[in-house]
Amino acid sequence: MIECFFDCSSPWTWLAFHNLQPLAAELGVPVQWRPVLVGGIFNAVNPSVYESREKGVPAKQAYLRKDLQDWARHCGLQIVFPPRVFPVNSVKAMRGCLWLAPQGLLVPFASAVFEAYWRREEDISQDAVLAALCQRLGIAPAAFFEGISQPSIKAQLKANTDEVIARGGFGSPTIFVGGDDMYFGNDRLPLVREAVLRRLAAG
C-alpha cells in the first residue's frame, strides 16, 4: 500500500526513511522501497534545484538548514549539512539497495549508507566506503560489486527513476499510498498516515 521512492543522497530522505518504518509498522502495512537517482529526476523535471543551491535566497537557505537540524534533533538523528562531499554520486549505493532487496537487506544497507554519509561524512561514491559497509553487514564486497554491475540492476534503477517522474514525482522522497496518492517529503508523513487509515477503513 505504501511505496517510497528514495535516494540516500538526500538528508530529508533519511528523515523520511527513518520515520516511515515505525509508521508502517504501527499501521500494519508494508513499505515497498523503490531506489532512484534523484539527480536524474532533477535533470529531467526539476533543474531549479541546482539554481537554488547557487543563487537561493540567503535567509531561506539559512532557515532550511535550521529546519533540517530541528527535524534531525526531533528524530534523534545526527545530520551534518553540508557533508564534506556534496552533492555525492550515489549510483553504486542505490544499485546496491536494489541488489540487496531480494536478500532482505535493503533497509539495513540503506540505513548504513545514510549513517555513513550524513553523520560521518564518508564519500559513499567510493568503493572502499561501500566495501566497509558491506563487511559490517556480513555482505561479501566482491559479490556486492559484481551484483551491482549487472545490467538488470542498472536497468531497474533507471526504470524506477523514470517511473517516479512519469507518476508526477520531482524529488526524493516521493511516497505513494494506494498507487496514485502522492506525497513528497518527510513532513508529509502525518498525511500519509491519514491516507493509509482512510484506505484501511474503506476496506
Image (cartoon, rainbow, N blue to C red):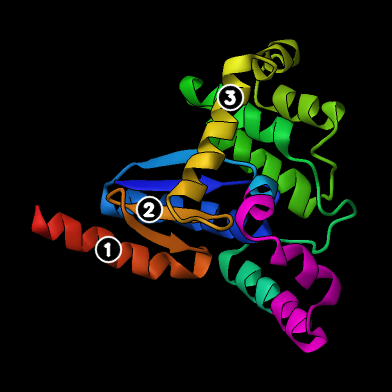
Residue that carries the numbered disc 1 in the rendered image: 195
Q: Is residue 37 left or right of residue 120?
A: left
The residue that appears at 58% across and 41% down in the rendered structure is 36
Label 2 residue SS: strand
Q: Nearer the viewer, residue 185 or 161?
A: 161
Using the rendered view, name the quadrant where residue 100 is placed.
top right
**Type of the residue with mark 2:** Phe
Q: Position of residue 55 (x, y in %)?
A: 84, 76
**Type of the residue with mark 1:** Ala
Q: Between disc 1 and disc 2, whose residue precedes?
A: 2
Q: Position of residue 76 (x, y in %)?
A: 61, 63
The residue that appears at 26% across and 58% down in the rendered structure is 196
For the magenta stretch, what is the residue range?
A: 41-66
Tell whether position 61 is magenta: yes
Q: Between disc 3 and disc 2, whose residue precedes?
A: 3
Label 3 residue SS: helix
The residue that appears at 77% across and 47% down in the rendered structure is 117
Using the rendered view, name the quadrant where residue 65 is placed.
bottom right
Q: Residues within 10 Å of mark 1 (few under 14, many from 20)?
A: some
Q: Are marks 1 and 2 in contact (CB under 8 Å)?
A: no
Residue that carries the numbered disc 3 in the rendered image: 155
Tell whether position 21 is magenta: no
Q: Which mark is residue 176?
A: 2
Q: Which marked residue is nearer to the observer: mark 1 or mark 2?
A: 2
Q: Position of residue 150 (x, y in %)?
A: 64, 14
